[in-house]
Image: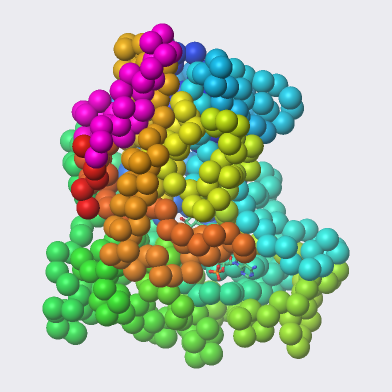
Amino acid sequence: MVIVGAGFAGLYMLQKLRTAGLRCVVIEAGDDVGGTWYWNRYPGARCDVESVHYSYSFSAELDQEWTWTERYAGQPEILRYLQHVADRFDLRRDIQFSTRVASAAFDEGTLRWDVTTKTGDTYNARFCIMATGCLSTINRPDIAGCADFQGPIYHTGNWPHEKVDFTGLRVGIIGTGSSACQAIPLLANEARELIVLQRTPNHCVPAHNHPLPQDYVEHIKSRYPKLRRKWRESEAGSNYPIGNRSALEVTPHELDLTYQYRWDVGGIPFLTAFDDILLDAAANATAANFVTRKIGDIVIDPEAARRLTPTHHPIGAKRICIVTDYYETFNRDNVRLISVRETPIERILPGGIALVGEHIPLDALIFATGFDTMTGSLMAMDIRGRRGTPLREAWADEPATYLGLMVADFPNMFLITGPGSPSVLSVMTMTIEQHVEWIAECIDTLEREGVDVIEASPEAQREWTDHVHAVANQTLYPAANTWYTNANIEGKRRGFNIYVGGYRDYDQHLERVRRERYAGFILTSQRHSEPASQFPERSAAIPN
Ligand code: NA7
């Protein structure tokens, strides 16, 4: 097996397959484990999902050994956790670090994958498993004059390993997504002057992060097996309380009380205060209005408050930012907010940045401009399936998959949390485990039954992709210009390829497909040189 990537997904896939006695190699571009947590080292980098959720559940011993110290773990702690996992399960010996995959091609003669690295090494494998992550390939817009800038340029998604000291410097930051919103308050503490270049304001909700008290940690640890089971059986894959009323059926007073309560609790559960916030524009507006009022209360300068108020998308249709002191930072004298919609960037100059009508001197520039999400890392490799078809060609219209797990015509290639799965709209660690366990069981079944090849049937792929769209179209997500809809990358085709039916619902699909002997997949046994199982005509139709 070749597994590409040594983040949460690749590490667990390796552990799982190796325990089953299979020979695996993981190929990883970084020089250590961690995936997105290896690269994203910018000041304030922190997960927006609580640490007790955002961790593996597969080992009860690991759950007991590891102690999370904060409600939301910071990047250094998550990286230490993954390093601990790699050591504890002796995973490093099968990981080829500092190696980037250049190409992967399926050989129809041998029914095996040839995986070639950028350094020219080749691996020949029966299965190729892409554990390449959803937010791994950085997006750095090509702004004229970048090469002329005389100071350092950083990207939040590829931050230096050593501390960067901005003391006394004039710093510019482009972008106001989650990464920027976490970094800005800390940068403002250090920089002489911080210029925030904002294209689209986003909704921010306080994290209320805090150290985890020992008695809480002990309580969680004593109940972990039960809790993990409960979270897996829940709709969203977590213990986030989901309101079971419409925001439109309560009084204004009740609305306020409910949102204030969620605001005081902090975090993503703000969005589940009512059950129609992401389904109904009017309900959504009640939540957005509450945040607008909070911005007005916190930000002293009315002009800055106006610029910070999101008007371009429904709340939650772009991932909300979970922050500490973000809005408060704009009350500082050394922070200036510029809307690049109102004052566009003309070019970068050797000593600063030229906006229409103004030149701003800068000593350092930070791109907090996000990622080529969901498909960026896969498209960066030259992946070829049957008849030498490039994945880039197969996905020219959209990244269609069956269940987010496989692509028709790319046999024996699995994706972990690929397009068409719940991925970034679920608790990632849990959906990663769900995919890893499903894939491991699938491979074990194929081994036992002498099946050589598994691949998605084109019909099942079409049906699933249509289903993904149908479910998404019942929500407010697809309408917004966000990285969920690929609108953040110039030239990238718009589309929404995240399954928003919920963790539990998706789990039921996976379970049904497994029970129905991998309905929707074509299983072929070379020995009989004929299909071992065909996609039963319409029997595996996906219920809407
Ligand atoms: P995001 O959320 O994609 O944010 C990127 C930001 O950069 C966003 O404000 C963009 O504005 C801005 N951007 C991108 N390109 C440009 C150009 N050309 N000019 C000006 N501004 C630009 O990335 P993050 O790293 O913050 O977070 C990604 C996810 O990681 C996050 O959602 C969490 O799940 C963890 P836009 O909104 O596109 O107008």
Percent coordinates x, y for residue 475 in the rendering: 30, 65
Please tell me in which quadrant of the rendered image residue 385 appears: top right
Compared with 464, 190 (above or below) is below
State the extent of the magenta-drawn residues as a range: 511-538
State how many labels appear: 0
Q: Is residue 140 magenta?
A: no
Percent coordinates x, y for residue 419 in the rendering: 44, 47
Compared with 266, 18 (above or below) is above
Percent coordinates x, y for residue 330 in the rendering: 54, 78
Compared with 242, 537 (above or below) is above
State the residue at coordinates (22%, 53%): 544
State the residue at coordinates (57%, 53%): 372
| Left or right: where 205 falls relative to 122 | left
State the residue at coordinates (53%, 38%): 132
Please tell me in which quadrant of the rendered image residue 291 appears: bottom left
Residue at the top extreme of this rendering: 527
